Image: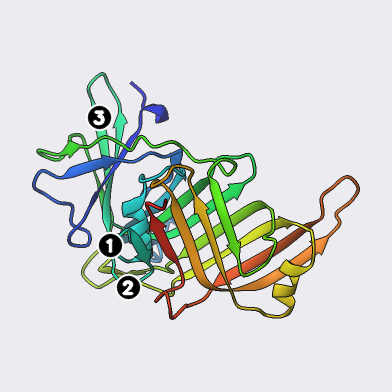
Amino acid sequence: MFADSSLLQLAYVNETDWGVTPEVAPVFTPLRLTGESLRIDQEGVQSEEIEANRNVSDIIQVGAGASGDINFELSYGTFDDILAGLMCADWSTDVLTNGTKKKSLTFEKRFTVGASSYEFFRYRGMIPNTMSLSLTAREIITGSFGFLGKGGTVASSAIADATYDSASSSNVMSASAQFGSLGLGTLDPQPSLLSLELEITNNLREQPKLGSLDNAGVGLGRFEVTGSLEAYFENADVYNLFLNNSEFALSFVLGSETGSKYQFDLGSVKLTDANVVAGGNNQDVMSSVNFQGLYNAGDGGSLVITRGVA
């Protein structure tokens, strides 16, 4: 039987020690997704020995690791563990502020290859490196997480005594019904948006070492949060934020059910680019801007995510 992608189960378990899957009765959480590209990385170097017959004599394995992306449609409560890893912090009274704590997961892909036969691909030490979040009017809120990890294995059976929780069942959010509010500085009126994009990176790096194919660690880089938005042009207020190099706060709420909403707060933001153009006939004039979040002393970080918002 050939494996079908629609039968994929992707699940994860939080690690206590980086790169070590819990060995005693791990409890995996199935993850909702729309696609993935998780992979075990193997790095080989071609031998440069001169052969009298002009052929390549060997490829030597010099490194291994794990990486890849998970694509998703946003739903409440589904990705809270991954968000904590992305922000390098623990949820504290339903609040996440980007920090410096490394948090890793083991991912397991299960492919069905027979009536009751499976192949399990496991990826250890996976730390969230990037997240993209895309909101466009009249579309589902979508995004992706990118990961960097220690290494991986393949097996034909589940881990001994492993159990699997149920995946979350909250509704998928749309940018129409679940875009709750916008706070762009103190502008009055607030602009009406066509789209909003958010990009986060931890600038992770592999840390190889002598005597091991696997990474010895994953290094944290600078936390950067950037994005863009398209606003219908009503006045020059948004564009003037760019011209004046103004520093302002940006916030938005996602969700429509009380207690099942997320609020994203960037306490200090500057616009890095802006433009207002009339592209041609029969089009809306848009203010298109790019922004970057900065460290905000009051928040203790660049980005604050709050869950359970009323």
Residue type at the position of mark 1: Lys
Instruction: Select label 3 or label 1 by which is in front.
Output: 1
Mark 2 neighbour class, 10 Å CA radius: few under 14, some 14 to 19, many 20 or more: some
Task: Report how many numbered discs are placed on residues in the image.
Answer: 3
Q: Which residue is mark 1?
A: 103
Q: Between residues 61 and 265, which one lies in front from this camera angle? A: 265
Task: Classify residue 130 by image quadrant.
Answer: bottom left
Give the percent coordinates (x, y) of residue 216. Answer: 25, 68
Q: Between residues 161 and 116, which one lies in front from this camera angle? A: 161
Q: Earlier in the sequence, mark 3 or mark 1?
A: 1
Q: Residue at x 35, y 46 (%)?
A: 77
- Element at label 2: loop
Tag 3 near tag 1, CB within 8 Å = no
Q: Between residues 152 and 246, which one lies in front from this camera angle? A: 246
Quote the CA–CA distance across marks 3 and 1: 29 Å
Give the percent coordinates (x, y) of residue 293. Answer: 53, 71
Q: Residue at x 63, y 69 (%)?
A: 186
Quote the CA–CA distance across marks 3 and 2: 38 Å
Give the percent coordinates (x, y) of residue 13. Answer: 23, 48
Task: Classify residue 218 by image quadrant.
Answer: bottom left
**With respect to residue 161, does 151 lie above or below?**
below
Quote the CA–CA distance across marks 1 and 2: 9 Å
Q: Which residue is mark 3?
A: 118
Q: Earlier in the sequence, mark 3 or mark 2?
A: 2
Residue type at the position of mark 2: Thr
- Element at label 3: strand
Residue type at the position of mark 3: Tyr
Q: Residue at x 65, y 59 (%)?
A: 229
Q: Which residue is mark 2?
A: 100
Residue 204 seen in the current view: yes
Using residue 52 as the reference point, say whether residue 108 is left or right of it: left
